[in-house]
Image (tube, grey):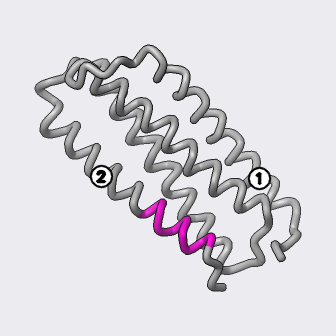
Amino acid sequence: MNNPFYNRLLAVASFLGALGVIAGAFGAHFLKSRLEVKDLETLKTAVLYLFVHVLVSLFICSIARSANPSRWLKIAGISFIIGIIFFSGSLFIIGTASLTQFPVSMIGIITPIGGLFFICGWIALAVSGIVKRPIH
């Protein structure tokens, strides 16, 4: 199957995976001596959730290539990417705020919204396993 949506999902998830490696290495090497332990833990959480959801996004691409993908599979992929951007992105900003002086008062609300997108993605992935209607 050569579906443009899943080709784009593959590209975006791979790009986010590369950013995760960069962020993890940057945190472990450059930021380790510059941030407090709680901020480093925030960054570790951001990287962990990024990688888990990058991997499941790649899994979705794999499913789509071997079967008739449903609308729910697309919703899951979109939800995971939005979740990564909101959840991990906001945690990266919060974790480095002591260095960047970025005002994080309004960023904190974005993190749970990202978490809700993750939850919706997992539910949509589950539904895609139950409902077998291909996209036309």
Membership of 86 in magenta stretch: no
* Label 1: few (<14), some (14–19) or many (≥20) C-alpha neighbours in 10 Å: some
The residue sitting at 58% across, 64% down in the picture is 59
Membership of 13 in magenta stretch: yes
Q: Amino acid at mark 2?
A: Val
The residue sitting at 31% across, 18% down in the picture is 38
* Disc on res. 21: 2
Which of these two is toward me, 105 or 34? 105
| Coordinates of residue 68 in the picture (x, y in percent) | 77, 77
Q: Which residues are magenta?
A: 5-14
Left or right of 24? Residue 79 is: right
Task: Give the quarter of the image for residue 96.
Answer: top left
| Coordinates of residue 93 in the picture (x, y in percent) | 35, 29
Q: Earlier in the sequence, mark 1 or mark 2?
A: 2
Q: Main secondary structure of the magenta part?
A: helix
Q: Please tell me whether mark 1 or mark 2 is closer to you in this view.
A: 2
* Disc on res. 101: none
Q: Amino acid at mark 1?
A: Ala
The residue sitting at 41% across, 36% down in the picture is 46
Give the Cα distance between marks 1 and 2: 28 Å
The residue sitting at 63% across, 70% down in the picture is 5
| Coordinates of residue 4 in the picture (x, y in percent) | 61, 76
Q: Which residue is mark 1?
A: 126
* Label 2: few (<14), some (14–19) or many (≥20) C-alpha neighbours in 10 Å: some
Is disc 1 in contact with disc 2, using a CB cutoff of under 8 Å? Answer: no
